[in-house]
Image: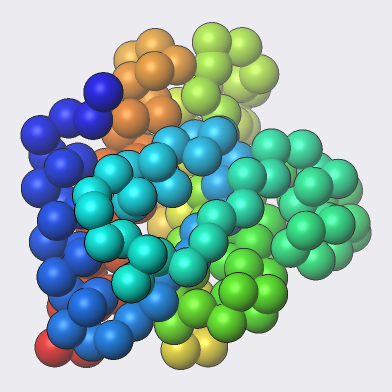
Amino acid sequence: MLTTTIQQDVATLAKKAIALNYQISCAESCTGGGLAFALTSIAGSSTWFKQSYVTYSNEAKHELLGVDQRILAQHGAVSSQTVEAMAQGCANRSSADISLSISGIAGPGGGSEKKPVGLVWFGVCHQGKLLCEKQIFSGDRHQVREQAIEFALKMLLQQLELKE
């Protein structure tokens, strides 16, 4: 079930993408397709949502998005370098106007001192420019994933607002 906030953000994003004649694609890891589910929750999303990649494993990130294995080996899946490569790969493969990538640790396990549970990195490739942000969310696995989707939608909205 999508929260009211997510539903409202998707509706606003749809209007802005249509007005700009933009195509959006995404590459997800820890959200497991949740962002794509949210983006396609409204009728007519096919006019502005192009495609999504769910690249949960490092192998999928490499094979489907072209993330260099050296980046994954050196920095890990949950890093600025990886989400930047994911966003760039998504943009290149989908030819979308804007792409967003997500990789994080939703928990309950898998965290460490340097990369705690709740750490999520976001990458955006917008007209060839890369932007990267990180957040540390609290709560259980479901809450972390939901917060990551909400944040991703806000990032996309911010990028589209820059074009208005």
Residue 10 x/y as whole percent: 21, 53
Residue 134 in sight from this viewpoint = yes
Asked whether residue 130 is in view, the answer is: no
| On-image quarter of the C terminus | bottom left
Residue lying at the far front in this picture: please name it.
43
Q: Say if 59 sits above or below 12 in the image.
A: above
Residue 102: x and y, percent? Answer: 52, 49
x 31%, y 60%: residue: 45
Q: Number of callouts in the render?
A: 0
Residue 110 x/y as whole percent = 66, 18
User: Residue 108 falls in which quadrant of the image?
Assistant: top right
Name the residue rendered at 47%, 54% in the picture.
122
Instruction: Give the quarter of the figure containing the N terminus.
Output: top left
Picture quadrant where residue 29 is located:
top right
Q: Position of residue 133 (x, y in %)?
A: 42, 57
Asked if residue 106 is positioned above or below residue 71 in the image, the reply reads: above
74 to the left or right of 83: right
The residue closer to the viewer here, 23 or 135, is 23
Q: Is residue 32 above or below residue 48?
A: above
